[in-house]
């Protein structure tokens, strides 16, 4: 006679067996992952790391997270910016995302969107704690931007500013890049998620150890542009072209959607590049779509003119004949048909506009801003250095477009406009040292592919003055940036160029917000230059950072007197005397203020 209890037990056993069978590998790999994390076998490089006590900074080695081994990564990094771990109640924190144009290449940090915009915001609201944190660096694209998003959200930004889209083909993980991972956005994003597993990274490292390392000389030689392009000819409308547009569209929608879900405001700008100042790098034939556009521009056009070079020549003809609108159309088609995809095609701006509208982001029309400041409305060498990167005026206008969009935001922080645009242009934070170093970098860039078929020798003339001597010492790595700035500061003070000295001192304030001395020097220089109102903010912060410093206290009291606030000057000196009760100089200054009253 059968036992009903046995029948019931046998009915449950297969289900339990399958559940256990499914859970065992999950538990097993979970334990291995836990062990890998405890042992720290292959931790992913974080976006932000510790700086001085109480501060964070972007991680210079974060690019390594996208590679099996750091030796395979391009030598690019984020400019250092220190910001507080605990965001202050009165702080306004902005994070910038993008590639080399967002990072200010070839000038660097002070021409970047973060550098230019930070200066404008601080001038608009000098009493607020302004933090503009750049995560931009050369060669990265929408995969990296999306991968950084959660870590950016975690630092509680008041806004995220995005200027990106040029690197979708030839940037890191781009569809035509030497640093690519495949042409499926889904597969690449899955790979990036797997690389957050320390167990997976450890397995990757083990595999990498068994494969040949890249030639270190090849890694170091030539420009990044010359090394990064795997597919040097990607035709308009080809499968690879479409894959680049698709990856940008998918990643950008996911990125903006993530910020929208976290209630982080986003400002995203349209892209600009050189339209008429540089002929196409690689001209290939167009397709039926471009042929139709060609005949709209030039009804008698020959099919042979349906190419990047053909459209560029027609743009030249139309511009000379006084038809700038049609000419610009020709130049833009020349850019779109240029098979070397260092410049984003027009379609990328369509993607940006659509993604912004769908996800509640603010669209910043950078292209219209630069176009309106260009001859005939065509962006060229007046605002661009080469094919892609703006000159100083171009970078200023790019940042100005974002600045004005921030001002227009109904839910924004209520910024004052600050100095007029002409004054702001005169006050840009880029120093003569930065400008000279940018010129040297540009020479090396243009001496290599794709500007030259073969790499050319570059000669930098010996320095003709003290400023060039400092710039070259920094550029060639003989001194670091801080040493270069200190030397330049001393030089400018010695020769009486207080405007340049103050600019450097104020940049040092931004670079080292936790140090009192740069604040004091900035304030003293502004006082000497007849700007006591501006000096007040710097000197007040110097005193907060070093309350017992007599120099800072004296200077702050002087600034208060110069702005007609003797009671505040007396308050500062009273506090200073409390800390230095036997200091006769402090007492004499207090007595002088009392007598003057």
Image: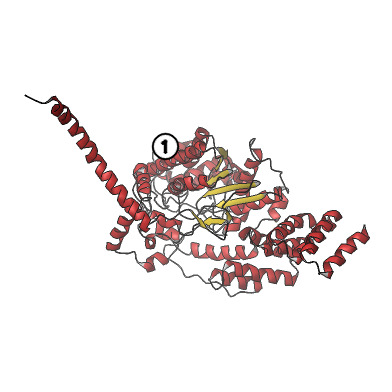
Q: Is residue 451 above or below residue 184?
A: below
Q: Is residue 178 visible?
A: no
Q: Position of residue 10 (x, y in %)?
A: 15, 30
Q: Position of residue 445 (x, y in %)?
A: 49, 62
Residue at 32% from the left image edge and 57% from the top image edge: 202
- Compare residues 479 and 314 and report the one nearer the observer: 479
The answer to which quarter of the image holds residue 208 is bottom left
Q: Position of residue 177 (x, y in %)?
A: 38, 53
The answer to which quarter of the image holds residue 404 is top right
Mark 1 residue crowding within 10 angstroms, few (<14) / some (14–19) / many (20+): few
Q: Is residue 381 above or below residue 402?
A: below
Q: Is residue 574 above or below residue 169?
A: below
Q: How many marks?
A: 1
- Compare residues 508 and 48 and report the one nearer the observer: 48
Residue at 53% from the left image edge and 64% from the top image edge: 441
> For the view shown, which residue lies furthest in the left direction?
1
Left or right: residue 442 versus residue 248 is right
Q: Is residue 82 visible?
A: yes
Residue that mark 1 sits on: 289
Q: What color scheme is it?
A: secondary structure
Residue at 38% from the left image edge and 69% from the top image edge: 217
Left or right: residue 492 versus residue 39 is right
The quadrant of the rendering that contains the C terminus is bottom right
The quadrant of the rendering that contains the N terminus is top left
Left or right: residue 211 versus residue 155 is left
Q: Position of residue 572 (x, y in %)?
A: 79, 58
């Amino acid at each position: 006679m059968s036992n009903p209890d046995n029948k019931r037990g046998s009915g449950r056993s297969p289900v339990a067996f399958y559940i256990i069978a499914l859970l065992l590998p999950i538990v097993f790999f979970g334990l291995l992952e836990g062990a890998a994390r405890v042992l720290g076998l292959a931790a992913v490089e974080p976006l932000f790391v510790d700086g001085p006590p109480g501060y964070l900074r972007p991680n210079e080695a974060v690019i390594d997270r996208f590679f099996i081994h750091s030796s395979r990564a391009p030598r690019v990094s984020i400019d250092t910016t220190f910001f507080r771990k605990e965001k202050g109640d009165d702080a306004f924190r902005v994070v910038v995302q993008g590639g080399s144009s967002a990072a200010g290449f070839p000038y660097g940090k002070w021409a970047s969107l973060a550098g230019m915009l930070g200066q404008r915001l601080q001038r608009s609201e000098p009493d607020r704690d302004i933090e503009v944190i750049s995560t931009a660096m050369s060669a990265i694209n929408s995969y990296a931007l999306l991968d950084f998003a959660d870590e950016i959200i975690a630092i509680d930004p008041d806004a995220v500013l995005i200027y990106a889209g040029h690197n979708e083909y030839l940037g890191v993980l781009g569809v035509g890049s030497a640093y690519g991972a495949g042409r499926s956005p889904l597969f690449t994003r899955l790979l990036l998620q797997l690389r957050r597993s320390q167990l997976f990274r450890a397995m990757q490292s083990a595999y990498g150890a068994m494969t040949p390392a890249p030639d270190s000389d090849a890694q170091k030689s030539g420009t990044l542009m010359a090394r990064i392009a795997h597919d040097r000819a990607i035709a308009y409308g080809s499968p690879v072209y479409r894959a680049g547009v698709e990856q940008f569209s998918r990643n950008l929608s996911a990125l903006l959607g993530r910020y929208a879900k976290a209630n982080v405001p986003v400002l995203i700008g349209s892209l600009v590049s050189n339209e008429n100042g540089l002929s196409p790098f690689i001209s290939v034939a167009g397709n039926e779509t471009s042929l139709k556009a060609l005949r709209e521009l030039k009804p008698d056009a020959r099919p042979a003119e349906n190419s990047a070079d053909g459209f560029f020549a027609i743009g030249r003809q139309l511009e000379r004949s006084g038809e700038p609108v049609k000419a610009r159309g020709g130049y833009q088609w020349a850019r779109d048909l240029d098979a070397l995809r260092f410049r984003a095609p027009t379609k990328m701006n369509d993607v940006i506009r659509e993604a912004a509208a769908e996800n509640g982001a603010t669209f910043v029309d950078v292209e219209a801003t630069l176009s309106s400041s260009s001859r005939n409305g065509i962006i060229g060498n007046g605002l661009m250095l080469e094919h892609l990167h703006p000159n100083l005026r171009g970078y200023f206008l790019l940042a100005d477009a974002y600045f004005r969009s921030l001002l227009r935001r109904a839910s924004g922080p209520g910024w004052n406009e600050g100095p007029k645009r002409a004054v702001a242009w005169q006050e840009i934070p880029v120093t003569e040292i930065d400008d000279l170093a940018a010129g040297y970098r540009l020479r090396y860039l243009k001496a290599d592919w794709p500007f030259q078929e073969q790499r050319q020798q570059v000669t930098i003339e010996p320095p003709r003055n003290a400023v060039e001597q400092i710039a070259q010492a920094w550029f060639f790595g003989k001194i670091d940036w801080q040493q270069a700035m200190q030397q330049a500061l001393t030089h400018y003070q010695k020769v009486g160029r207080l405007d340049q000295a103050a600019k450097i001192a104020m940049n040092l304030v931004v670079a080292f917000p936790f140090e009192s001395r740069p604040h004091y020097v900035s304030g003293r220089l502004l006082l000497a230059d007849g700007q006591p109102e501006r000096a007040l903010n710097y000197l007040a912060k110097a005193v907060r950072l070093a309350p017992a410093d007599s120099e800072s206290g004296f200077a702050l009291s002087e600034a208060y007197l110069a702005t007609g606030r003797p009671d505040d000057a007396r308050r500062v000196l009273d506090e200073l005397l409390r800390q230095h009760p036997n200091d006769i100089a402090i007492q004499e200054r207090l007595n002088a203020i009392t007598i003057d009253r």
